[in-house]
Amino acid sequence: METFLDCLPCVLGQVLEASRMATDDAEIQAKIMEKAVAILADYKQYSCSPAIVRDMHQVVKQLTGVSDPYSAIKARDIRAAKKAEPFLTHFLEQKQDKLYWALKIAATGNILDSAICQNVDIEAGLETELNKAFSVCDIGVLQDALATAKQILIIGDNAGETVFDRFLIKQLAALHVVYAVRSEPIINDATMQDALDSGLHDLAEVISTGCGAPGAILAECSPAFLSAFESSDIVISKGQGNFEALSDCQRPLFFILKAKCTMIAARLSVSLNDYVCLYATPSAEASDD
């Protein structure tokens, strides 16, 4: 997906946030911002916003020597999500359509996105978010696909969200579930260590995308991930970053996300903060361009 002009100030603010997490040295922060602005000025060379974000955050890592500025936030979010597990378990037990509500739980985990939402009060907002219906919900297509599927690939998003994804994976227990995480720390996205910390490896085969961007940019992904991406009967892509990286890809897949910016909401023809479970095909995406 092309990089919208609205993305530019957003990613710049995000890098400033990361620089302040990584160091208190104002001179280093200034150097980071200078380099980040230079990258931003050349935004047209990038295929999508996640590629820009990846390069800008590399500057933070290089100039501060901190490989994972969001490590404490990710640990906090995983703890908060685990604390919510009993509530989520009870919530799902009360529902008849378990697959629908497991999908909704997985989508609601997207509120644990420190890259966009600051100081999320998960306990206060969780029930309200869970009870918001999907604005777009292609669950019927997913159910049809599940009838014959053997392997499903889920491309993860933020670290805290991995705990929420456990509920969806349990509903898919009859399949071989492969769960993909980022190859290295980037913002608050899930890495292999975060997946281990959330216990995801007990339910799924966890692999790396091989890509360090906050979105699975196929041209940069590993052969192992691409093999899983191509051979899986169903692919579920989670979050806005993966949507930005994969919305033009040449295979059908499901996008599960909360539209947390106006540009993504407009692209999906939904309102800001709506939840989406969208089945997309190459022909459908092409018609949108």
Image (cartoon, rainbow, N blue to C red):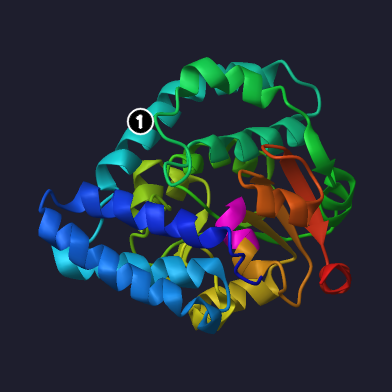
Q: Is residue 215 visible?
A: yes
Q: Where is residue 180 drawn, in percent x and y?
A: 51, 61
Which residue does the numbered mark 1 point to in the structure image? 79
Magenta highlight: main SS: helix
Q: In which quarter of the image is the N terminus?
A: bottom right
Q: In which quarter of the image is residue 182?
A: bottom left
Q: Where is residue 205 drawn, in percent x and y?
A: 50, 58
Q: Can residue 209 be seen in this view?
A: no
**Residue 77 sits above or below residue 190 on the image:** above
Report the front residue among 191 and 39. Answer: 39
Residue in the image at 48% along x and 18% along y: 123
Tag count: 1
Residue in the image at 48% along x and 24% along y: 122
Left or right of 229? Residue 20 is left
Left or right of 206? Residue 74 is left
The amino acid pointed to by label 1 is Arg
**In the image, residue 241 lies in the stretch drawn in magenta:** yes
**Residue 131 sits above or below residue 203 on the image:** above
Magenta segment, which residues? Answer: 239-243
Q: In which quarter of the image is residue 55?
A: bottom left
Left or right of 188? Residue 130 is right
